[in-house]
Image (tube, rainbow, N blue to C red):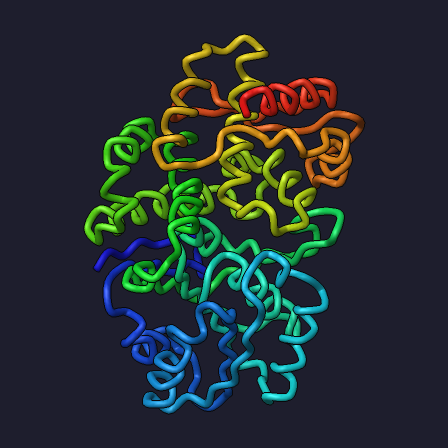
Amino acid sequence: MRTLTVELGERSYPIYIGSGLLEQIGSYLERHSVSTKSPLLVVTDDHIAPLYLDKTVEQLEHHGYRVVTSVVAAGEKAKSLSVFEDVMTAAIQGGLDRKSAVLALGGGVVGDLAGFVAATYMRGIKFVQIPTTILAHDSSVGGKVAVNHPLAKNMIGAFHQPVMVLYDVDTLQTLPMRDVKAGYSEMIKHGLIWDEAFADWCYSHADSLLSLNREDLAYGLEKGCAVKAAVVSQDEQENGLRAILNLGHTIGHAIEAVGGYGEFLHGEAISIGMIGSALLAVNRGRERSIYTRTKEILERFGLPTALPKHVDTEQLISALLHDKKFKENLIVFVLPVAIGKVEIVSDITLDEVRSVIEQLKEEA
């Protein structure tokens, strides 16, 4: 078992990574003072529910917890205000109170949705992340919770830190290969922004990671979570440093929105977005090797590095206008300086972005 800590003073919390943890969930909740006197709400999706929901509920009830469940449709479209209302209804009807907790059993979508419910139910109750995807090693750490608006991703949200992150790597063995590949996008990102040696390790261990070798998978998750934890510990609410975690996300989020939150998986869109950021950096005078190495690593995992030609450039630009980082006709971007090092640039023009979007299409 691997244990990390997100250092946030009185709100610090652990990340547990290992095998068989789901079978011990009741013990972990008791260890972290989650009351057995108030009902729990477990939020999951219809892909994960048949695999792990009954086991989770059984373990919780064995430890004396009363459990309410809410199963949402799998996919990014569940991060909507209408689904948020449905989960809130389940919480109210289930009698949750101020001592209750919301458990997110699933990937990043379930974590963001359930976390936003926890952040807003009775103005905030306890929250536990139980990620079941590789991608969620990023989203489950740091306390960013949100739902989407049709015009913009994560526009409606809050900062609400979990009590703990319980990461059972056994649950990753049932992931479809497309989700496995997409999940590694965020792991690679952590190397690209912080640790060149880790980015190189990901490249050299791609076959092992794609085959879900438990030892290498646990190591990669620990390293990725450690980068996220270090950044969040220094800048919880993205007043500065934490923005580096957005590498690839500005263009990536626009791609997701234009695709109706269904055409592209989050990790796929972020992969294309990271190539876009590398191209922007090259256009601004950085070494072309940054772009070629970034592309080489992402393609090693079978991730997309080009934008399909049917994606409308002006629709992407329109989506960017709703980005939280857009102001006064300029947009903030995270650009690579080298592999393992990035900078936050606040004067990127829409014309520069438009040019990069066209370059991304030329790659297809």
Residue occupying image coordinates x 49% and y 82%: 40
The residue lying at 58 percent from left, 30 percent from top is: 307
Q: Is residue 167 above or below residue 333?
A: below
Q: Is residue 257 above or below residue 38?
A: above
Give how far across and how far down residue 130 sits, in percent.
41, 66
| Placement of the N terminus among the 4 image quadrants | bottom left
Compared with 197, 6 (above or below) is below
Q: Residue at x 40, y 57 (%)?
A: 133
Instruction: Please give left or right for residue 243 compared with residue 337 in the image.
Output: right
Q: Position of residue 146 (x, y in %)?
A: 62, 57
Q: Position of residue 101 (x, y in %)?
A: 50, 76
Residue 71 in sight: yes
Looking at the image, residue 98 sits to the left or right of residue 267; the answer is right
Horizontal side, residue 362 vs residue 17: left or right: right
User: In front: 238, or 270?
Assistant: 270
Q: Quadrant of residue 352?
A: top right
| Quadrant of the drawing holding the C terminus | top right
Question: Front-most of 266 and 87?
Answer: 266
Q: 236 and 58: which one is in front?
A: 58
